[in-house]
Image (tube, rainbow, N blue to C red):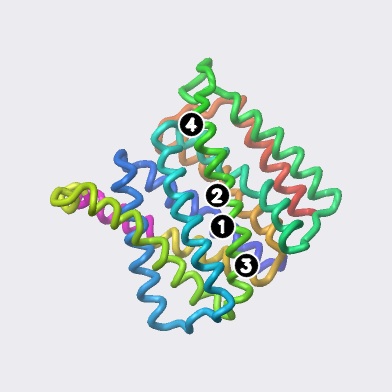
Amino acid sequence: MTPLVVAAVLLAAVTHASWNAIAHGIRDQLLAFTLVGGGGALCGAVMACFTPLPAAAAWPYLLGSAVLHIVYQGLLMQSFRLGDFGQMYPIARGTAPLVVTVLAAVFVHEVPDGWALAGVALASAGLVGLAVWGIRGSGARPHWPAIAAALATGLSIASYTTVDGLGVRASGTSLGYIAWLMILEGLVIPAYALATRRGRLGAELRPFALRGLAGGLLSVFAYGLVLWAQTRAPLAPIAALRESSIIVGAAIGTLFFKERFGLPRLAAAGLMVAGIGLMLAG
């Protein structure tokens, strides 16, 4: 984890929270993810013209990752429909490094030390705290469908993070890998929207086009930085550092969506970030 890798992943964290906030801010989530996916696919197509093809060994990972990303996007849409950004984002993102730590140990043989395991335990405690705090303001009972969707989103994040960590290392070109990943995953939701909304899709997209396409550009930039970092450092600490975006997401939820974060959520998010710090130290 050189300073350059750390800086790249921190920048990816800020950028990732930003595009998620853009998507959440568009009330119709199918429209939001149609624009983000379409913008990402367009960026990928441009990049593919100027980058080499990934090596043959990387294509099974690319195809598997594209499927996992589509599942992730569907689950993320459901999370944002059901819950507050300030809670759904930390649960989804906080779950991922915990699972990546396990997957990296099993499939990549990157075994965590005692510091990392302590970080997993601490971050898990923060995750439980976020899960039991009410979804719609102080005093409300947990909304379990929303929490389940956010947790499932976190599992999908961990799965594609591990698959992409292996794939980008086998590809020989991190830029080529992200380009083709964006192409493969980015067109599915727009195609679904076109099939279900038919003639009215263009008119519905128009008011949000600039915001949504900007979100797509940010998503490509954020994940491209992560994939580049995965070629230069172990998967688990990168996943952990990337989820410092939890703090950015909490601030965005409070400042722009007027969501009450409150002391319990702040304490829970603090535990998660402290746990991530321990995993990074390990």
Identify the element where label 3 is drawn.
Answer: helix
- Magenta stretch holds residue 7: no
Q: Earlier in the sequence, mark 2 or mark 3?
A: 2
Task: Please indicate whether residue 76 sits to the left or right of residue 94 in the image.
Answer: left
Identify the element where label 1 is drawn.
Answer: helix
Residue located beneath label 1 in the image: 160
* Residue farthest right in this picture: 114
Residue 85 is situated, as x and y percent measured from the top left of the image, at: 46, 37
Tell me which residue sits at (46%, 43%) in the image.
Answer: 75
Residue located beneath label 2 in the image: 156
Q: Nearer the viewer, residue 8 or 93?
A: 93
Q: Are marks 2 and 1 in contact (CB under 8 Å)?
A: yes
Q: Amino acid at mark 4?
A: Ala
Q: Are marks 3 and 1 in contact (CB under 8 Å)?
A: no
Residue located beneath label 3 in the image: 229
Observer-side mark, 4 or 3, equals: 4
**Could you classify mark 4 by the number of other residues whose Cα lies within 10 Å: few (under 14), some (14-19), or many (20 or more)?**
many
Report the predominant secondary structure element of the magenta stretch.
Answer: helix
